[in-house]
């Protein structure tokens, strides 16, 4: 893991997670543990309307956290509308120490490296049914209220889990923009590191 990113991880404090939120995270913990105990592939698809901010943060931090705790997973993200991985989210990832490279274009594909051998993550905005995403035997983790409320059925998922996060988009073009993107990213990191720390 890159040095700056490792420093970020070392600042994570599970005591900042409320008991209520830990109860919600238990659904994810139980799913991952259940799949691991059965020797099955663990597939997690983080879903938000535009697949541009929260679901992308979640896909990336889930993979980093799982690798950190030695849990083999396949981490995905998707949405119900096609947009792009928001450039503000990209800048936040860079501030946290990720190495990010872009293909360019209207919906660029990003290669996101966190310093683990062969562990580069490909990130771009995509629909749930995109060919890169799993078609069955996965957990659909809803990271925003809009997708959670307006996408009642996720075809092929074994379990649907609601882990809603407030949208940092609310702070776009304000003096708080960078700090709120980083705050949301770190909140997601904290919760997902907590979840994977519980996997036996």
Image: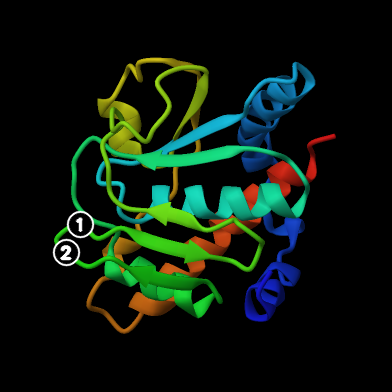
Q: Which residue is mark 2?
A: 105
Could you tell me which residue is drawn at 64 percent across and 57 percent down?
190
Point out the residue furthest to the right here. 200
Q: Which residue is mark 1?
A: 107
- Image position of 147 (left or right of 104): right
Point out the residue furthest to the left here. 106
Viewer-closest of 44 and 174:
44
Compared to residue 65, the image places residue 127 above or below, namely above
Q: Quadrant of the N terminus?
A: bottom right
Q: Are marks 1 and 2 in contact (CB under 8 Å)?
A: yes
Residue 176 on image: x %, y %: 36, 79
Q: CA distance from mark 1 to mark 2?
A: 6 Å
Q: Quadrant of the C terminus?
A: top right
Residue 135 on image: x %, y %: 40, 20
Total residue callouts: 2
Q: Label 1, secondary structure: give it.
A: loop
Compared to residue 67, the image places residue 10 above or below, namely below
Point out the residue furthest to the bottom here. 175
Residue 92 on image: x %, y %: 43, 73
Could you tell me which residue is drawn at 52 percent across and 17 percent down?
137
Viewer-closest of 102 and 14:
102
Compared to residue 136, the image places residue 105 above or below, namely below
Residue 69 on image: x %, y %: 77, 49
- Image position of 12 (left or right of 187): right
Q: Is residue 180 visible?
A: no
């Amino acid at each position: 893991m890159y040095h700056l990113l490792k420093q970020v991880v070392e600042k994570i404090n599970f005591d900042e997670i409320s008991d209520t939120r830990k109860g919600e995270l238990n659904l994810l913990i139980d799913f991952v543990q259940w799949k691991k105990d059965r020797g099955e592939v663990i597939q997690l698809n983080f879903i938000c309307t535009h697949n541009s901010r929260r679901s992308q943060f979640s896909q990336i931090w889930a993979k980093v956290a799982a690798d950190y705790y030695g849990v083999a997973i396949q981490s995905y993200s998707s949405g119900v509308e096609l947009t792009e991985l928001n450039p503000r989210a990209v800048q936040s990832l860079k501030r946290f120490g990720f190495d990010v490279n872009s293909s360019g274009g209207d919906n660029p594909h990003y290669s996101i490296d966190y310093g683990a051998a062969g562990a580069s993550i490909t990130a771009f905005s995509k629909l749930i049914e995109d060919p890169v995403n799993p078609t069955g035997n996965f957990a659909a983790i809803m990271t925003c209220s809009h997708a959670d409320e307006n996408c009642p059925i996720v075809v092929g998922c074994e379990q649907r889990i609601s882990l809603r996060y407030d949208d940092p988009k609310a702070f776009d073009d304000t003096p708080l923009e960078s700090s709120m993107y980083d705050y949301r990213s770190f909140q997601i990191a904290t919760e997902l590191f907590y979840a994977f720390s519980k996997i036996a």
